Each structure stands twice: as structure tokens, then as C-alpha cells.
Image (cartoon, rainbow, N blue to C red):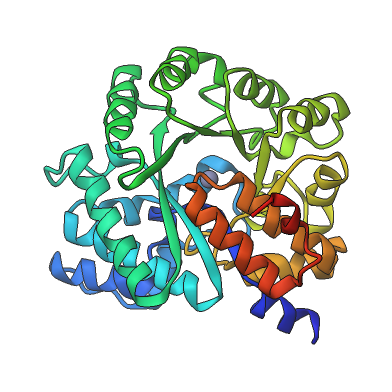
Amino acid sequence: MTDIEFIQKMPKIDLHCHLDGSLPLPTAKRILKDLGEEWDEERLFEEMGVPDDCPSLAAYLACFDLPIRCLQTADALEMCARDMAVKAAEENIVYLEARFAPSTQLLGGLSVREAIEAVDRGLKKAERETGIMTGIIVCAMRHLPEETNLAMFRQAREMLGAGVSACDLAGDEASFPMHGFRNLFEEAIRLGLPFTVHAGECGSRANIREAIDLGALRIGHGTAASGDPALLELAADRGVGFEQCPTSNVQTKIISDFSGSPVREFMQAGVPVSIGTDNRTVSRVDLTEEFSKLSAFAGLTREEAEKIYFDSVSMAFAGDGVKERLFRKGRDFFGPSAPGRESGL
Ligand SMILES: [Zn+2]
């Protein structure tokens, strides 16, 4: 089997995938048509796909304007979630955690609960159609008032285990550093709400350290930890996994190219690592391509891809039953000597 055949056939897990940034183009076209707007896919691709010469994370975030505008009704959210997950299943993604910020999808009159329920319906549809397993991560946004984010966390807590898997903090990290969110995450801990945090996406190691100190079980990106053995040791000791999204990091200029990806450095430091797409449409990427490029340009081996699969299962915000099925899928593909055999499952 060539590497690309192996990567295509390998079961994959995407723990870092934003719903709005992954709105499939045909779905966007249908939603906009319902709004009375005619768009062809080429124009949509130009509007939503990040330019090759993207100057910054802020410019990257501007590509979300159109998908956010599209996703303001229950039907649109449901359709997007279903179509995105079906597309993920086509490349043999067996478990997907879709994340979104309900607070930015309420312009059409939806409540936070209704928005989450709509996404959950779409994902469940895809589960029935393809066998993919899914979860929802509810994102607080850095630019929103603390009260809005707190209210959203409380709503998410009510739906934990009933659609919602965990929470996250997303948005413009450079303008809103981690120390402004202490109250928010103290409340998450008080509520018993597991969370990941986007941190270290803009060069700040302090944000990663602070997120870990506040109780983050995972770090979104964490790329700035590269070259900081003490920080990596802290993450490894606490078992905090890093959700790496190399294409997105190249586009936002955190790393120069795939050869600069810290994925293998993190793994060698004992940090659990998962590979995510971040934004399938905005970043113009899928998980097969991420692994292919890591293999071609960063020297990722099959054994390391296998380790990433099992680390991803361990990192997943999923119940024991789902994890057991994912471990079994991994052992079925990678063989009985795969690391998951030690899980006791
Ligand atoms: Zn992200």
C-alpha cells in the first residue's frame, strides 16, 4: 500500500473542525438561494476560501463573514452539520467533533438551545446515513461580553451528554489574551463542563500555560509551545492533548510550511496530538490531505499516524461506549499490536 492509499483507508478522527468554516459550498449555494441570492460555487470559493497570501489570523477570520451569514436558521445549521459530517465520512473520518459558536448564529431569532439542537439533528442524520460518530463543542468567542459567554456555557451544560460534548474559546487570540477569561473557565470547572481552548495560535506561550492552569483538557493548536521543553513537559505531565491543524497554521503564518510543523516534536515530548482540519472550506483542506502533507513534508511515519489515531481517541470528548468502538476500529485497521490494545478495552 502506498502512503496515500494507507492514509485514505486509515480510520481518521477530526477533533478540531469549525462548522461555519466547513460549510460545504453546495450547501452554501442552496442556503443562499433560499435567501434569494444566486451564487456560483466559484464565487463562493473565492469569498470563503482563504487567499494563498493571507496576511494574518484576523484576515483569515474575515473569510467567516459569509458562512456566518448563511447559518442563521435551524434548517441551515442542520443542513450544514449533516452535509459536513457526510463529507467527512467519505474520507473515512470515523469520529468528528464539530464546534461552533451559537452566540454568532442567533440573528434569525434562534435561541442558543435551538441552534445547538439544530446542529445535533444534522449530525445525528449523518450518523444514521454513514455510521460516523460525532459530538458538538460549543465555542465561547473572545470578542463577546463575558455575560454572553457565561450564559452560553450554562446552556451548554444543560445539554452536556445530550448533544454537547464540551466547550471551547475561539476568536481573535492576539487581541483578547487568556487572562481575561479566568471567570469564564472557573465557571466551566464549577459546572463540570470539560473544555478545550484555542491557545498558542498567535505566538503566545503564556496563553497555553494559562489555559492548562485553568483546567483545559486540550489545547486548540498550541503551536507556540514549539521550542519550549518546560511547557511541553507540563502538557505531557497533565495529559493535555494538542489539536494541531497544520494547513491552517501555514495560512495564518504561524509556521512557514509543513516542514516547520511541530507535530512530531510534540509527540516526541510525550504530548498527545490529534490532527484536525480547523476549517474544511475556509482552509480548503481535508484530513487526508493534512496527513499526506505531514507524511511528505514533515516525515510523519505510519507508526506516528497510528499513534495519533489512538491519542485522538483518548483525547475525544466522548463517552466510554464511543471510545470503545473507536479503539476497536483502530485495532481492526492497525492490527492487534496497535497501542489501543493497552487501553484495557
Ligand atoms: Zn480553530
Which residue is more in the foreground, 90 or 100? Answer: 90
Q: Is residue 183 above or below residue 228?
A: above
Q: Is residue 91 above or below residue 214?
A: below
- Pick the quarter of the image with the N terminus: bottom right
Q: Which quadrant of the figure has residue 159?
A: top left
Which residue is more in the foreground, 42 or 329? Answer: 329
Picture residue at 40% right of the left edge, 32% below the top: 141
Q: Can you give x and y, in whole percent of width and height, for residue 338 in the image?
A: 78, 63
- 34 displayed left or right of 77: left
* Residue 224 visible: yes
Q: Is residue 123 above or below residue 255?
A: below
- Pick the quarter of the image with the C terminus: bottom right
Which residue is more in the foreground, 224 or 96? Answer: 96
Picture residue at 48% right of the left edge, 36% below the top: 170
Q: Can you give x and y, in whole percent of width and height, for residue 245 in the image?
A: 64, 52
Q: Is residue 265 above or below residue 205?
A: below
Tell me how many marks there are. Answer: 0
Q: Can you give x and y, in whole percent of width and height, for residue 288 in the image?
A: 64, 72
Q: Can you give x and y, in whole percent of width and height, for residue 165 in the image?
A: 42, 43
**Residue farthest to the front, as pictured:** 344
Picture residue at 37% right of the left edge, 68% below the top: 127
**Residue farthest to the bottom, as pictured:** 1
Picture residue at 57% right of the left edge, 18% below the top: 214
- 39 displayed left or right of 138: left
* Residue 51 visible: no
